[in-house]
Amino acid sequence: MNITKYEKQVEALSPQTLFTGQQLIWLTECPSTNTEAQLLAGQNRATDGCCVITDKQTAGRGQRGNQWEAAPGENLTLSVVWRPTFLPPADQFLLSQAVALAVHDWLSALLGPAPALRVKWPNDIFYGSQKLGGILIENTLSGAKIQHSIVGIGLNINQQQFGVPTATSLGQLTGRAYPLAPLAGRLLESLERRYLQLRAGRVGELRAAYLQVLYRFEEEHAYEAAGRPLRGRIVGVDATGRLALAVGRQIQHFDLKEIRYL
C-alpha cells in the first residue's frame, strides 16, 4: 500500500479492496481534496483508485458552484481517482449513480433499516429533509473516453452544530461519536463494490437501485423551473442524467441548474 502522512490513521483505514484506496494520501489541511486529486492525476502520480483525504478542507466545492463547509476533524472529506475508460462519456451519469448508491449502502449499514435515507438527485445524501452529505464528480475527457474521474465526497459524521437547519450528521442521528479512519476504510470498500458492478456492465441493476432510493420518487411536490413554480412527480432519470418530472400529462426533463426543489 502506497501511503503518505498520518501513518497511524492511514493504517487504520485498511480497506479490503482490489485498488480503491490502496494509494492513500491523508493531509492535515488542503483547499480541496478534488483539487489535490486532480493535480496528482494530471501529473500521473495517482494510481487507479488513489484516495486523498483531509482533516480540514478550506475551499471545498459542491454542486452548482456552492462551497462545501465541514468542521475540521469531525467529518469525512475525501476524493477518489478512478480511470473508467470503459464508460462512454455519454453514460457518465452511471458513475454518479454508482457512487451515490455506494454511499447509501454504507450509511444503511451504519443506520440499519432507514426509509428516510435517500439520494436526492443527482447525488446528495438526505435523511428526511436534511442533508447528510454531498458528492461532486469531475470527469476529464480525452477524445471519446473518460481519461479519469475525481469522485469527491463530503459526509457529516460527528459535527453537532451547523449554520443551516437543513443539515444533519450521522452523530446527530444516532447519538454516537465515530472514529473517522475505520469509517473511511469501509466507505472505500462500498465504493469499489458499486464501481465493479458498473465496470461489469450491470447498469440495469444500478439504474433500478437508484430509483428505489431516490428522494421524492413518485411523490408530487412543488418545484421551481425558469423562475416559475410548478407541481410535479419525479418519475425517473434519463440516460444523460436529466430529471424526469411528470407535470400534468407531460413528462418534462431538467438539467441540474434548470430546476429547484421547494
Image (cartoon, helix red, strand yellow):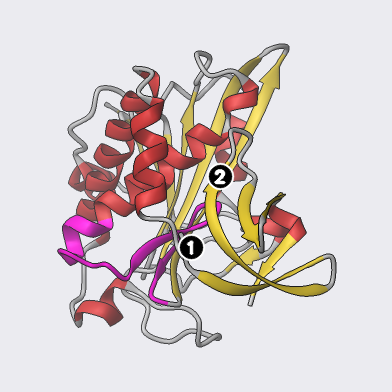
- Residue range (magenta): 107-128
Can residue 30 be seen here? The reply is: yes
* Mark 2 or 1, closer to the camera: 2
The residue at 18%/61% (across/down) is: 110
Between 216 and 32, the residue placed more toward the observer is 216
Report the amino acid beneath label 1: Lys
In the picture provided, is 89 more to the left or to the right than 70?
right
In the picture provided, is 182 more to the left or to the right than 226?
left
User: Percent position (x, y) of residue 104?
Assistant: 32, 53
Please name the residue that numbered disc 2 is placed on.
Answer: 237
Considering the image in quadrants, where does the C terminus appear? Answer: bottom right
User: Percent position (x, y) of residue 81?
Assistant: 48, 31
Local crowd size for mark 2, using a 10 Å CA cut-off: few (<14), some (14–19), many (≥20): many
In the picture provided, is 228 more to the left or to the right than 247?
right
User: Percent position (x, y) of residue 244?
Assistant: 61, 50
Q: Residue furthest front?
A: 249
Please name the residue that numbered disc 1 is placed on.
Answer: 56
